[in-house]
Image (cartoon, rainbow, N blue to C red):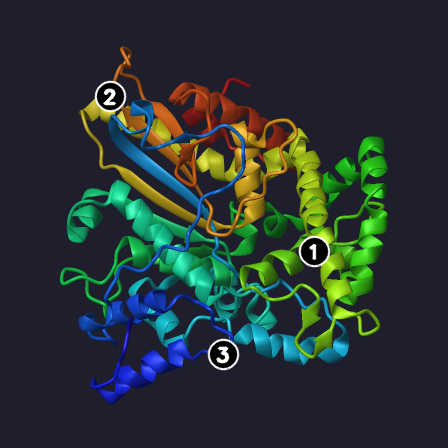
Amino acid sequence: SCNPNGHNPRAKASYEAAQNHPHNNMPATNVCSLLLKRRILPSSFLQSSPKCIFSTTTATARTTNITSNDDLNSGTISAVYIFHRHGDRTPNRPLCADHQIDAEAKFWRTKLPPSELVSSVSKRFPTQILSPPHEKEKTESQFCDTKKEPFGFLTFRGALQMQSTGRRLRKRYNRQNDIDFLQSWDVSVFSTKYLRTTLSAQFFLDGFLPPTPSLSEESPILPVSVRDRHNDNLNAFDKNPELMSTLVSHVISDPYFQRHDRTAAPLAARLANFLPGLMLTKQSSFGGPSGINWIHAADHFVCRDSHDVPLSIMEGGLLNGGTPMEEMEEAMRSMASQTVAHLAWRFRQWYRHPPLLGAIAAPPLRDVAKEMMQQRTNVRRYGEAKPLFRVYSCHDVTILALLYALKANIVKEGSRFWPPYASTLVLELVTGIQGDNNDDFKVRVFLNGKGVKEELMTVDDFSNLVNALVLVDEAMTGATDDASRDTLGVTV
């Protein structure tokens, strides 16, 4: 156990502030390790290694552990692309009655990471705003979610999840001296224009490149690049909302979608009876007979369950004052799995629609494919090339779209999979795989440390898959990129 008694007052005060953070149910060893790493606690405080709270997906689709297959571990890695969902966050918006909102906001503020930790990782991995000159002032003034605090913000638990994820991937890619890694690899990190994704990237890097004698805790090490939402390839819903609304409307107007979504209307009505804020989100629900925003509905269950908070209680009172608590809790529990399942079904219909899938998955995968093709060319031409290391901090809907685009096993027919917080989708460009007589470049795909493709793809196969998405996306947007077609080898 950790005990600050007998040490300097600043250490004791910082420790107690974190340990006694209201409603904070993080394990003591995690709190201690985080403060220890910041040199606020002396090393004698940590008596045992903190337990990593990051957990891989529990989905039952066929996957292959990266430690059990030579195809997934052998060879020389020429490029790594890590797409990760942000860590645990607070609900995206309050769904309680108006008189409960202030108390609800006060509660969720107690779940946010300590400001000194945020300041520390932000100093080591500063934000770099990427935008056209005329947009710069507007972009730097605020993120998309600045005015929503504390709703939709990364929690302390989420920060530790991302830090643990960084430590886990460090074991695979950064077994050398950190300075050598930064000099040996071409490293870039990108985030969508949200505080929760930017901070998630910073905590991921803090785990991947922790403070050491060779890496100062006070000096900037690596920037996290944030593009303006109109130029962001990681979030099509923000980049082109009008197009996305049109494409979604094509899906929801389908008779099959209408029939199935209508069967969820009674569940939606029950949810809205307990969560009146759902009725205020109808316009942002992308339509359908069920009539609510299912992401916001699922939020209620996921966020409260993550923090062991009763589903039937908001700060300031019960969700429905006229119903006994035990009865209400049982009712909410019975609706939880149905809500998440219907949300996954809706997005499954969206992502089986090629134009919609292309609009979301084509932009980021096109960037990956172009770099992979160029990397292969450089290695063949010059005998070697500096390996690439890319990190993209994004959202569940992006990760899910990429899995559908890559035809991953985990989202095959009948799947109700939804990416958990801190999920990582990794693409590796590798050559020299054991037993590969062709010795050609291959693409490996992992989700949370497990392979999700039955076979490795050649770079050409991967490029052809991306080409199909790009052509569909260009047909819908009217945009063309002849340079990218040439690089990818597309024949039009």
Q: Which residue is mark 1?
A: 333
Q: Which residue is mark 3?
A: 22
Q: Secondary structure at mark 2?
A: loop
Residue 72 drawn above or below residue 105: above
Horizontal and vertical percent position of residue 237: 63, 49
What amino acid is labelled 2 in the image? Gly
Query: Does residue 204 appear to the left or right of 136 in the view shown?
Result: left
Residue 491 drawn above or below residue 99: above
Label number found at residue 101: none
Residue 358 drawn above or below residue 40: above
Q: CA distance from mark 2 to mark 1?
A: 50 Å
Q: Nearer the viewer, mark 2 or mark 3?
A: 3
Q: Quadrant of the C terminus?
A: top right
Is residue 196 at least partly visible in the picture? Answer: yes
Residue shown at 62% from the left, 33% from the top: 415
Residue 467 drawn above or below residue 59: above
Mark 2 or mark 1: which comes first in sequence?
1
Is residue 129 at least partly visible in the picture? Answer: no
Question: Relative to the observer, which residue lies in front, 289 or 147?
Answer: 289
Q: Which residue is mark 2?
A: 432
Mark 2 or mark 3: which comes first in sequence?
3
What amino acid is labelled 1 in the image? Arg
What amino acid is labelled 3 in the image? Pro
Q: Nearer the viewer, mark 2 or mark 1?
A: 1
Horizontal and vertical percent position of residue 294: 72, 51
